[in-house]
Amino acid sequence: MTSKNIKTISDPKLKLEVLTKEDVQKIHNATLQIIEKVGVRFPSKRALEIWEANGAEVDHEKKIVRVKPQIIEDALKKAPPAYKLAARDPQQDLYLDGNHVNLGTDGCGVEVIDIHTGVKRTSCLQDVRDIARVADATEEVAFHWVSVSAQDTPVEARGLHELKAVWENSTKHVQTESVYNVEEAKAAIEMAAAIVGGKDKLRERPILSLMQCTAPPLGHDGGSLDAALLAAEAGIPTGFMTMAACATTGPITMAGDLAVGNAEVIAGTALLQLAFPGAPVFYAAAQTASDLRNGSYTGGGPEDFLFGAATNILADFYNIPLSMGSFATGAKEPNWQAGLEGSLSTFMASIVMSDMLLGCGFLHGSRIWSFAEMMMDCEIFSIIHKMMQGIEVNDETLALDTIAAVGPGSHYLGQKHTRKHMRELFMPQFMDRRPYSEWETKKDDARDWAVTKARKILKEHQPDPLDEKMSLELDRIIKSVEK
Amino acid sequence: MSEELFKEMAQSIIDGDSDISTELAKKSIELNIHPLEAITKGFVVGVTYIGDQFGLGEAFLPELVMAGEAMKSAIAVLEPELLKLGEAREMMGKVVLATVEGDIHEIGKTLVGTMLSASGFEVVDLGVDQSADKIIGKALEINADIIGMSALLTTTMVRQREVIEELDKEGLRPRIKVMVGGAPITQDWVKKIKADGYSEDAIGAVKIAKELVGKE
Ligand code: B12
């Protein structure tokens, strides 16, 4: 199954086992023990009521829930193992079925390196539009996370302005993490329903999905919980993302950190299943280690890469799709560190077939959007896409006839076999393989070519627009939320 | 004899061992050592050492945090004795710290608090998701010199402005100074909301706080 103009990784030929079956069972058992004995904080009236009605032990004062393993395990079994993320253009629907790795943009940034001036500045609504448009044209980007914060729009409806901007500039699926309270969530669902033609239609064709962070260690945010419950009720794919980070919000050891994050995510997921059995849910994670000198969320480094490969094994164990943080970097500009962290995190998350990857385009710990970074991240994804196809071994690829024809010495450039297969070799867009002297006169590199490409797309690409009447309808819904 | 004890006190802080620092504080009372002396010649030496090592990149955050905890435990024992003598420790200043309403990001704020405490400030950390009323109320209650506010969301950074406007309305500035921080906070924003100080990290926060109380 493929989606129009979208490149996803499928039918992988590479494999990696970072956790054995026994390891996973141990982590699972530890997780159940944490949920039963230590508990998880659910600061939402609605959530606590659901837990209580389903036999959990609820401490209303501390808002901590302790749950018997059986309740959690039974609830998780109700989650659908596979489903589609619908797109405004049905040909661009995405498959969350364990056999597709779909790349998204990163989201919720606060600053942007201006595509024309190259100067860093506060993010605004036009940036959301521009990024959506470039992503729409890029085959590596399968879906959008609302990329940056539209800081020139009213606070109470900001998440909605952002959604509208993406829908107006792209036909691909949209996932948001910028909607984290009931009012905005209600309106966001209404907007999505309006576009597909009603609430029932939206259940069939969820063109919107919602991601909420957990609040590590072992907690959730009240607004996020209520928003997630609303979304699950409407049949919109919903996921909880843990960011439990070794040393600060999680144990210093990776296994312990996985268990804490897992407890947050599966407790949240079980809640959604208890409330709305069969609701489409996903596991989300961006675990990492904290920097020991300044406490920063590293979003990179070997621990981060290992988490990237471990988490899908957990999500597979629970038989639900995974959205995995990748491409995170602390680098301040697209440089060695950004390339290294982007490549390894994405490779590790891809080789285990994470269903969604978040996401390309950011610098400085998910804060600064860079179009150059976005384009180069896409190329990294393409390289990994190619690597995941592995090496095909058969008569045609062994090429014995051609080898005999060329014999010892000579070369393969003039062979039909070469011509036939040459386009299977990876052709980079942004790698410098020129003569030294050419570089010496121009002194340009990947970053320049990447921005140039983004500029060209922005100038030329015309996405399939949203009906004007529909835009007005979305405006009406947004207005109803604005104070 | 007390020299030995002072050394042990410093070491208990360096080891981040609250049990031992508490015990040593009690012991110093039994031995009639002046509490201020126990603090400055004993425990503070340990804090300073860890602080210096941290600055050099040799010590790590968990060591700093645990040194802070061990220090707190010792002070908790010694402070009542000081009060009995009608004396008080000399502090750099009082700070009320919080993450603003609607925002649950905690780590950055906590680190700022840790560093301020380690540098001799008295810090009341209110936690996350704190309303303007609570923050200002606490500042008035303890007669704070500084309010420190963390905001990591573009939708909650406006709360920093609300607190500043409220303080201005009540005529509480410049008596109470305001410093801010968090992921979306920029120098421009700081100017716009007329905050008194801003820093991108916890070490910078200490420097700013010292400036704001005129001790740098
Ligand atoms: C970890 C993290 C979380 C964790 C926090 C865990 C915890 N217990 O604290 C969790 C998972 C809970 C979380 C939740 C969310 N997050 Co968050 N989070 C982050 C992340 C990756 C790192 C923050 C961090 O801990 N840094 C480490 C500390 C040490 O650094 P720091 O906080 O910046 O603090 C330092 C300085 O800023 C300064 N400082 C901080 N405060 C103060 C105060 C004063 C007075 C001074 C002087 C200095 C100062 O000194 C500190 C120490 O050096 C940031 C991205 C980033 N790189 O900042 C996103 C980020 C802040 N989160 C973001 C978002 C969107 C969210 C959610 C809304 C997502 C969701 N839909 O659920 C929720 C928030 C819900 C809510 N109502 O608050 C966005 C916000 C941007 C925006 N558009 O508004 C960011 C930028 C990431 C992104 N692009 O998505 N998050």
Image (cartoon, coloured by chain):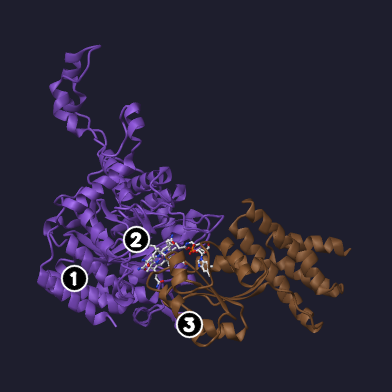
The residue pinned by badge 1 equals A192
Which secondary structure lies at badge 1?
A: helix
The residue pinned by badge 2 equals A284
Give the farthest residue toward the right.
Answer: B1
The residue depicted at 43 percent of the width and 45 percent of the height is A337
Image height of A322 relative to B68, above or below: above
Give the farthest residue toward the bottom.
Answer: B170
The residue pinned by badge 3 equals B132
Q: Which numbered mark, 3 or 1, is in the foreground of this view?
A: 3
Q: Residues within 10 Å of mark 1 (few under 14, many from 20)?
A: many
Q: Which chain identifier belongs to the brown chain? A: B
Q: Nearer the viewer, residue B28 or B91?
A: B91
Q: Amino acid at mark 1?
A: Ala
Dot 2 and dot 3 residues touching (CB under 8 Å): no
Image height of A50 relative to B63, above or below: below
Dot 2 and dot 1 residues touching (CB under 8 Å): no
Q: Where does residue A477 sit, x and y in percent of width and height?
A: 20, 78
Q: Where does residue B42 sit, x and y in percent of width and height?
A: 78, 64
- Ligand 1 image position (quadrant): bottom left
Q: Nearer the viewer, residue A313 or A7?
A: A7
The chain identifier of the residue carrying mark 3 reads B
> Does residue B75 appear left or right of residue A129 in this picture?
right
Marks 2 and 1, the one that precedes in the sequence = 1
Q: How far apart are labels 2 and 1 at the CA level?
A: 22 Å
Which secondary structure lies at badge 2?
A: strand
Q: Amino acid at mark 2?
A: Ala
Q: Which chain identifier belongs to the purple chain? A: A
The chain identifier of the residue carrying mark 1 reads A
